[in-house]
Image (cartoon, rainbow, N blue to C red):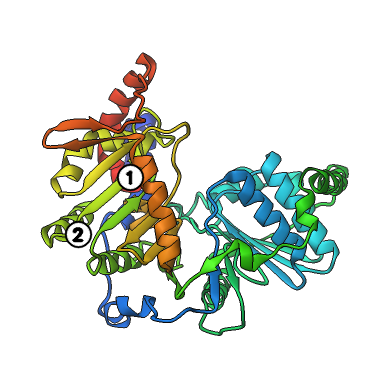
Amino acid sequence: MKEKSVLFWKKIPLKRILLFLFLLYLAALIVPYIPHKKVSDSFRKSFSENTFYSNSTGTERAAYIDDNEEALAYRLRMIEEAQEEIILSTFDFNADHGGKDILAALQNAADRGVSVRVIVDGISGFLDLRGNPWFQAAASHENIEIRIYNPVNLLMPWNIQARLHDKYLIIDRELFIYETQDDPDSSLYQLLDYFEQVWQLEESKDYICSNLTDKVNDCILELEKQYDKLTEQYPEMLEEWDWESLTMETNKVSLLSNPVQAENKEPWMWYSLHQMMQEGSEVTIYTPYIICGPEMYDDLSSLTQKGIPVEIITNDVASGANPWGCTDYLNQKENVWETGVKVYEFMGAHSCHTKAVLIGDRMSIIGSYNLDMRSTYQDTELMLAVDSPELNALVREEAERDKTYSKVMENGSYFYGENYEPKEISWPKKIFYAVLRVVIVPFRRFL
């Protein structure tokens, strides 16, 4: 028997064994996420769209920031103003120029005695933080803690798909929301509770400085110098800011989220958005790209069949920054149009990265959610639902401006906004998209 067994294994080519193992690994990576979960009865019963509105002015004020330089100035000023604690959650954190600016400001705050906690997605932790001396420098500080959500473990491929897609900064209050008085029901406390859930997860692992090398010490000193440069470049970060004058009134601000566990998720976010959209007189969706599954198509169709006008502003394929999203739109745009939504394909100076939903003339929902299956079923996602006519009008004004830079399909023909300037796709890119349109079909739900 033993000799027969040896002879049997010798007859199987090594390449077949390797192919079998690869397919087995691939199955472990994707099979757990193939079935799309439905929202549980308990979540349905706990959700009420009416709770996101108020008939009186609330304690929180909002600022809508749509400029990168201005956004950085806000972050730096709020880090500078922090006295007790800073919380940062991000999908992607690189030690590039902007990343070092933030690290320098965080290190300076930690030197002042401020407690700093940072959580980063596992893929970014693997690609950007692992062994990086700049992050090692930050982690070496006694007042800075860094954790990685769902670190990459190649021996457990079924976990790799779940990503931390949250992006927020809390500095004694939330980044773009200013709390005028302490309110335990405010979005700030909702977000703090959410962060603690993610921070305490078994899937969130400590990132530590394993060895305080000369390179790491050099980075610590360089971050100190970088902070001095920041104060010269952005002197306003050292000045007192009038938060009241920089923000607008809101009636209520609430947090929407997906489940936090690193697993195939119930679509809490999409369910919440769809329920709220059903009560609107009109809906505008900003999304960098569209990758919908059958359930999402059905939900969009249900809105238009109820007579609710739905507009989607997304990137023109020629200007989109996400090749997967652009390619899927080339394959799926007829299916998107058949739902009855009106899609504006935006061609601006830069690719649009806005993620927002405007409902009627009061509700603005802004955050990290993309209109795709990954954001719906796999990733953690956060959106702030803001009941504020003033904010809604401001974002709608931006949407109307962006529509003039867009083309839209109506009655089988494209119509072009007055500011739309077509951009020719290069032949190498056309060939790339042609190949990708075939390749992505079996994997589109994971893009």
Q: Which residue is mark 2?
A: 299
Query: Where does residue 161 sit, x and y in percent of width and height?
Result: 42, 52
- Closest to the observer: 345 or 433? 345
**Residue at 66%, 47% in the rendered image:** 130
Lower sequence index among marks 1 and 2 = 2
Image vertical order of residue 312 relative to residue 406, above or below: below
Q: Quadrant of the C terminus?
A: top left
**Residue at 35%, 46% in the rendered image:** 400
**Which residue ends up furthest to the top in the rendered image?**
427
Query: Where does residue 104 sit, x and y in percent of width and height?
Result: 78, 51
Distance from disc 1 to disc 2, alpha carbons, whole Å, reads 18 Å
Using the rendered image of the protein, determine whether residue 388 is visible from the camera's viewpoint: yes
Q: Amino acid at mark 2?
A: Asp
Mark number, residue 313: 1
**Residue at 86%, 49% in the rendered image:** 224
**Residue at 19%, 59% in the rendered image:** 299
Q: Amino acid at mark 1?
A: Ile
Query: Where does residue 408 sit, x and y in percent of width and height?
Result: 24, 37
Query: Where does residue 6 sit, x and y in percent of width and height?
Result: 37, 39
Using the rendered image of the protein, determine whether residue 202 is visible from the camera's viewpoint: no
Q: Residues within 10 Å of mark 1 (few under 14, many from 20)?
A: many
Q: Is residue 214 left or right of residue 3?
A: right
Q: Is residue 131 left or right of residue 109?
A: left
